[in-house]
Amino acid sequence: MTAAAERSGVSKHIAVVGAGLGGLRSAEQLRAAGHDGPVTVIGAEPHLPYSRPPLSKELLAHELLGGGGGAPEAAGAADDLGALHQRVAFRRRASVAGVTFRLGTAVTGTDLTSGTLALADGGTARFDGLIAATGLRPRRLTVPGPAGPGSGRHVLRTLDDMAALRAGLRAALRDAASLAPSAPVPSPPVLAPAGAGPATASGGLPRPRVVVVGGGFVGCEVACTARWLGCDVTVVEPAGPPMLRVLGAEVAAAVQASHERAGIGFVIGRAVIAYAGQDRVTGVVLADGTDADGSGFSGARIPAGQALAGAVLPADLVVEAIGSVPNTEWLASAGLDLTDGVLCDNSLAAHPAGRPWAVVAAVGDVARFPNPLFDDVPRRVEHWSMPTDTARRAAVTVTARLAGDPVDTTPFRPLPSFWSDQGELRMWSFGSPGLADEVTVAEGDLREPARGLLATYRRAGRLVGSVAVNLPPLRHRELREALLAQ
Ligand SMILES: Cc1cc2nc3c(=O)[nH]c(=O)nc-3n(C[C@H](O)[C@H](O)[C@H](O)COP(=O)(O)OP(=O)(O)OC[C@H]3O[C@@H](n4cnc5c(N)ncnc54)[C@H](O)[C@@H]3O)c2cc1C
């Protein structure tokens, strides 16, 4: 028990820092675990918890082209931040009716000895137990060139990021359309398996040029959505085919080929070294190199054989999707291991050096913990399923420790899972395919992943993951069970 709890003598106060999915689920699960004392969820964003997956997909495209199709109208009611938030806000369950949400103020510091959090607005908040649910923020490219608001460089993590990107896409689409006022307008895009989408049927309408830097899941989703909207899209990825680390080379190449057929260009194996432009980005400057046969490119922007030193991909808008950084600075003085997130044990408890009495746990994307389903190496998992699973366990741990009860030592073996909608492909991943040393295409044809594909991933012969593309949801249960049976 902290000094603060001893002083107060009232029921224990739990602070949850971060008001995303993990923060909301933590509050719900604290109640489910029997904690009936005060709970405060403190969030840096001004919004009540909302779902992030639609930010790169349907919400980004939502009514962007207007009811009549073709060039977008000026921003309207659909762009209002409150209206956008309502479309993705999580339902507030009755169990969190008594939970206090303190929003729009970041936690900037933590004093475990006094049980006090420092807030960016100058205030403080007290706690006996603490749950860190602060997630991640986008990593930024530190290269020369225009930067900051209005520069045309975007990232995507929050609703506000999405609103800025959406406004940028709207402006770029309108600018492009104004260059060809008499050109025929395309039909509005449909966010459903749609092959090449409207961009191929634009009848000569100029397209805004969007460059997505980074070929991970978020980058590929944004690329597909921008393509649906009628943009000319190129993904730049230095490491290899998109989502290589998770999918493995063969499946990643198959996904790339599918996206290329939908009209998305890829520049693989080249890093971005600068942005061209004065106040606004006009192009992306690629690293040195020579592409002897053009194989590193598709999208045919740079002819085969051309030296790439300083080669520029023209861009009206850039989205940087080059990975994320855990939000842990507010815990810097807490004596925790903050190497790549908050290090926890298998019960999600974090152990501050020199303060064994402190009750601290972490959940969601920011938590790094060992999962005996695979091995004893602590890892962070940036999957949708994790905030809910980890919140359930962390709430039980924190509630027990505050009550002085023994902590549940049953091994916590959550099965990671996530989905990704990319053009005509709906991918579902179970387990941790990224750990595998062997990939097998168990079903389907790599040349036609849209017709259904199943890849299984093994490490030292043991199944550690599977990726299903366009397989019916009925199959998912069987894939999950195969992994849990390991
Ligand atoms: C664009 C996008 C698309 C995605 N699509 C998919 C998908 O299709 N499928 C899938 O499985 N997963 C997807 N994900 C991943 C999924 O959304 C995340 O795994 C999930 O949101 C993690 O939840 P979290 O609560 O751990 O973190 P977050 O949702 O990031 O919440 C953390 C919150 O903490 C706040 N915070 C940070 N620092 C502080 C501080 N110092 N003080 C107070 N508050 C703070 C942040 O502002 C944020 O609101 C997507 C993610 C993004 C960004």
Image (cartoon, grey):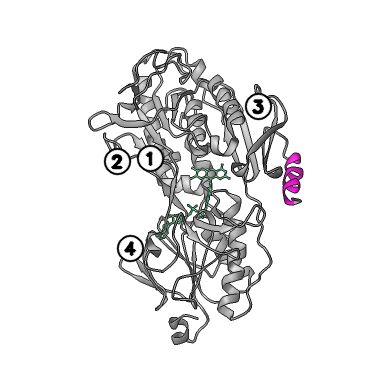
Q: CA distance from mark 1 to mark 2?
A: 9 Å
Q: Is 452 displayed left or right of 57 in the figure?
A: right
Q: Is residue 477 magenta?
A: yes
Q: Is 208 displayed left or right of 443 in the figure?
A: left
Front: mark 3 or 2: 3
Q: Position of residue 159 (x, y in %)?
A: 44, 46
Q: Which amino acid is tagged 2?
A: Pro
Q: Position of residue 485 (x, y in %)?
A: 76, 51
Q: CA distance from mark 3 to mark 2?
A: 39 Å
Judging from the image, what secondary structure is the residue with disc 2 in? loop
Name the dominant secondary structure of the magenta segment.
helix
Query: Label 2 crowding class (10 Å Cα cut-off): few <14, some 14-19, many 20+?
Result: few
Q: Is residue 362 magenta?
A: no
Reading the image, the residue beneath label 2 is 149
Front: mark 1 or 3: 3
Q: CA distance from mark 4 to mark 3?
A: 48 Å
Reading the chain from its start, which is encountered first: label 2 or label 4?
4
Task: Using the image as rendered, state which of residue 267 and residue 24 is in the foreground.
Answer: 267
Reading the image, the residue beneath label 3 is 449
Q: Which amino acid is tagged 4?
A: Ala
Reading the chain from its start, which is encountered first: label 1 or label 3?
1
Q: Which amino acid is tagged 1?
A: Ala
Q: Are marks 2 and 4 in contact (CB under 8 Å)?
A: no
Q: Which amino acid is tagged 3?
A: Pro
Res 92 quadrant in image: bottom right
Reading the image, the residue beneath label 1 is 164
